[in-house]
Amino acid sequence: MSQTGPVLSNGDAEDFVPPYPFRHEVAPPVWTLIGLAKKNFLSIWTTSDFQGRLRSLKVFCRELVLCNRPDVVRQAFQTNHIALQRKSPQMRHALEPLLGDGLFVSDGETWMKRRKLVAPIIHGSRVPGFAPTMIGTIEEKCAEWASRPNGSEVDVLAEMAHLTAEIISRTIFGRQLGKDYAGEVVRGFTEYQKHIDQVDLLAIFGLPDWLPRFRSKALKQANARILEVLDEIIDSYHARKDAGEVSVIGGLLEARDEDGNPLSREAIRNEAAVIFMAGHETTANTLAWTWFLLSQSPRVLNKLHAEIDATLGDRTPTFKDIASLPYARAVLEETLRLYPPVPILAREATQDTLISNKKIRKGSLVLVVPWLMHRNPVLWDLPDTFWPERFLQDSMKPNKYGYVPFSIGPRICPGLQFGMTESILSLVMLARQFDLRLKPGTEVQPVCRLTLRPGETLPMILQPAAGQG
Ligand code: HEM
């Protein structure tokens, strides 16, 4: 970390450039790249990959097309949605045991039908109604942390995963589940990510989708446990409904398609798995990264505290306060720029198409890589610097196709408002009461397996915030 640091164009002195993996000057040989990708997808890129616009390369039998500017991202994910809506074989094979034909990995007819059913369950218009449950769950986390001795060590990555899984569990699946299902799912998903094969070599070599992929015993066990939990939740729905509980997941169980047919049992479980997985892990990683960034940037932390004090005083926030917390939002938006939880959005072309007059052949992989585009020096001033203020100035607001932590086009994350709302509420409620310092000696590096995480754990030291002791 430099002592003086750059002086940003709005006059803020900032010295914090958070960690990122080594960038190659020249691309290593393909086999080296595959080895690197298996460990961490973020360590394969060259400096010029960050600056490019539209680039293609051949990896064995696959054509790879990299879209790295708003105009080409728009063509790929919006204009060419029909041809480029299918997820990459790597993503489909990695998640298929868990999500089956669920929304996140499906395409075509199935995707369209399921999107119509699932998106309304988590839609932004429902978020004000979810907010009291979010706030209650965060208050419980505050109470739990307050009961720990001053200076306790917490694994912030696991803590945030439990918090967001508990929020999704209570808002969507019901408040009276009774067991620690959220905890079981978090543990299961962490194991699942650990054992998933990162690079689908069969697909790279052009071998067909139906060839079975190797899956370890540990992966199968983690998968089975998550599915068991989801089955228990679904099974208990009718009993809980009869006992007066209103739960949003009922929308899925009682949904009918255009012909009046209910979803199959398997489809319900797949969509429940999608909502649980997509709905907790991404938000948890965002919050964990935010705590890390704040711990390294006292200037930003002080400004955040000033906004919280001015807006809330001692009051518990409500949904309405969110509009009056622009700095908290900007801190999260900047975190999502630097560490997008889904750092690679990969699609497989299902037909020949064109991007910027370049022919894309059926079977090509088209990649929008937020990790690269969010740090493209052509699009961003000081691209590697943590500087939330950039999101507060209208003149610097990013093009919507150039800033895509929630993806863009018809497959945009339907949980965007949900995720931002729970993140802002969690940030302000926890930051007001607690100060989190990185455990001395901890080295943080971003690692991408299915999602981008600050390593396996994020050990931090918990203290009361100034004025709370
Ligand atoms: C900070 C939080 C979040 C981030 C950064 C995020 C990001 C994303 C991204 C990038 C995708 C598209 C992936 C791709 O195209 O390969 C996606 C899809 C999805 N997300 Fe989120 N998400 C977040 C929170 C949530 C929440 C809270 C929910 C549910 C309550 C949710 C539900 C979904 C679903 C169902 C999809 C699949 C949509 C489709 O394929 O049509 N997400 N999310």
Image: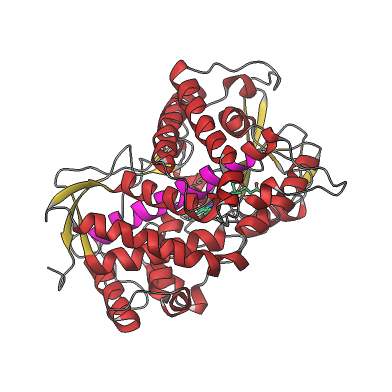
Q: Give coordinates of residue 377: x percent, y percent.
A: 47, 58
On the picture, is 304 further left or further right than 255?
Answer: left
Q: Give coordinates of residue 115: x percent, y percent.
A: 71, 50
Q: Give coordinates of residue 79: x percent, y percent.
A: 76, 55
> Residue pushed farthest right?
259
- Check the image and report above or below for 200 versus 83: above
Query: Which quarter of the figure has residue 108?
Result: top right
Q: Residue at x 46, y 22 (%)?
A: 221
- Check the image and report above or below for 346 versus 217: below
From this viewpoint, is residue 366 visible?
no
On the picture, is 328 further left or further right than 242?
Answer: left
Q: Residue at x 52, y 51 (%)?
A: 370
Which secondary structure type mostly characterizes the magenta part of the structure?
Answer: helix
From this viewpoint, is residue 454 visible?
yes
Q: Is residue 272 within the magenta segment?
A: yes
Q: Residue at x 15, y 50 (%)?
A: 152
Q: What stretch is highlighted in magenta?
A: 270-296
> Residue pushed farthest front?
243
Q: Is residue 183 within the magenta segment?
A: no
Q: Which of 118 and 420 is in front in this view?
A: 118
Position of the C terminus by quadrant = bottom left
On the picture, is 160 further left or further right than 333?
Answer: left
Q: Which of 121 and 382 is in front in this view?
A: 121
Q: Give coordinates of residue 290: x percent, y percent.
A: 34, 57
Q: Residue at x 60, y 53 (%)?
A: 407
Query: Count the marks: how many?
Result: 0
